[in-house]
Amino acid sequence: MKTINLAATALNQTPLAWESNAANIRSAIADARAAGAAVVCLPELCVSGYGCEDAFLSPNTHERAWATLRELLPDTSGLVVSFGLPVFHHNTVFNAAALAVDGKLVALVCKRHLAGDGIHYEPRWFKPWPLQVRDVFLAPDDGEEIPIGDLVADIGGVRMGFEICEDAWVARRPGGDLAAQAVDIILNPSASHFAFGKREIRRRFVIEGSRAFGVSYVYSNLLGNEAGRAIYDGQTLVASTGALVAEGPRFSYRDRIVTTATVDLDLSRLAQSRTTSHRIQLPDATHPPVVKVRFAWPLDEVTVGHPPAPEAWEKSVTIKEEEFTRAVSLALFDYLR
C-alpha cells in the first residue's frame, strides 16, 4: 500500500500585498506540514493575488512575484508544493503553477484554458499555453533553466499533473491527457468565485475527474473578498478514484484553511490498470518526456484525520439564503480589514 498525505488549501490573499501574501502562504505550508501532509496545493495566482487586473502586465509584478517565490522555496523542504503566480516568458504573460520539491523549483506548468466569461477577463492579461508544448524558462534572477509548459512531473516515482481552474470546466479537460501519461495525482489550483450552485458543480468535476482518470484529485481555492470585486468561498476538496475523501469548510473568516487527507496510490493505479478504455501514451516527438525529480517520500503510513463533515446548513432547504448571508458577511468583513 502506497499512501500519501495530500493538503488542499484555501487562502485569503490581497492583490499585490507581497509581504502578507507570502506570510499567509508560509503559514499554510507550516500548517500542512504539521498535519502530516507531503503534498501541498496552493490556490491559483496566490503569490500575487488573482485580482491584479492590468498590473499583471507590469514588469514589476512579474519580478516581485518571482522574488517572492524564491523567498518561499526554503519552506518547501521535505515537501512537494505548488504555487500560483504570473510568469513572463517570450514577451508573454502566462498563468502558471510553480512546482517546488524539497526546496527546489522543478517545473512551471501553464494554464491551457483561460476564463473569459462572466466576471473574468483572463485573456486580457494572459495567453493560453498550447497543448503538448514544452519549453525552457530562464529564471530572471540567476538564469536557471526550468522546464515550462504542458508538463507532467515524476517525483520519486509518483506522477503529478495540473488542471488549473478553468482547465477542469471545459469539455476536453487536460485530465484526459494526464491520465494517458499515467499520472497518480492531479492538482487543481483555482480562483473560483462564489456563485449559487457552484459547490455542487465543483464537487462533481473533482469526484468524476478522480474516477474517470483513475487518480487522486486535489482542489484548492481562494477565500474572501480578495480585490473587493469578487467573493471566494474557499471550498477545498480531495477525491480519489471516484470518492470524496475530504472537504473543507466554506466562507471562513480565517486567513487560511488547510484540508488534509490520506490517499492510497495503489488503488488509483489499480483503477487505471483494470479500466479497458485506459490507454497509455508513451513519450515520442509530439509528447514531451516527463520531468523526473528525485524525492524520498515519507516511509510511515500516517493516517491524517479528515475534517468534520460539512455543516448542516450546506444541506439545508434554504441553502441559497444561507450562502447569500455568509457570502455578504464575509465580503463586508474583508472589505473593512
Image: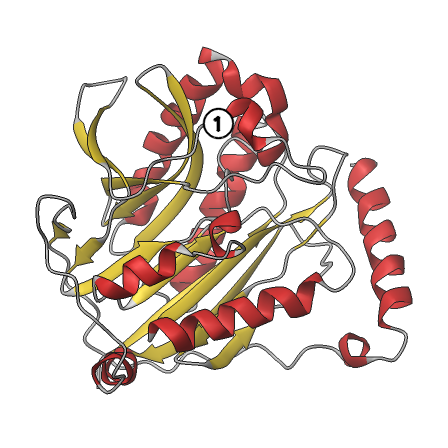
From this view, report whether residue 286 is shown above or below residue 220: above
- Colour scheme of the rendered structure: secondary structure
- Identify which residue is drawn at 51% across, 16% down: 57
Q: Quadrant of the N terminus?
A: bottom left
Q: Position of residue 136 (x, y in %)?
A: 18, 29
Quick check: 8 left or right of 54? left
Quick check: 104 left or right of 316? left
From this view, report whether residue 317 is shown above or below residue 238: below
Q: Within the image, what quadrant is residue 122 found in?
A: top right
Quick check: 55 left or right of 230? left
- Identify which residue is drawn at 61% across, 29% down: 15
Pick the residue in front: 337 or 218: 218
Residue placed furthest toward the left:
284
Pick the residue in front: 33 or 164: 164
Q: Position of residue 19 (x, y in %)?
A: 53, 29
Q: Within the image, what quadrant is residue 186 found in?
A: bottom left
SS at circle 1? loop
Q: Position of residue 330 (x, y in %)?
A: 80, 50
Q: Amino acid at mark 1?
A: Phe
From this view, report whether residue 135 is shown above or below residue 273: above
Q: Within the image, what quadrant is residue 87 found in?
A: top left
For label 1, the residue is 126
Q: Position of residue 43 (x, y in %)?
A: 51, 48
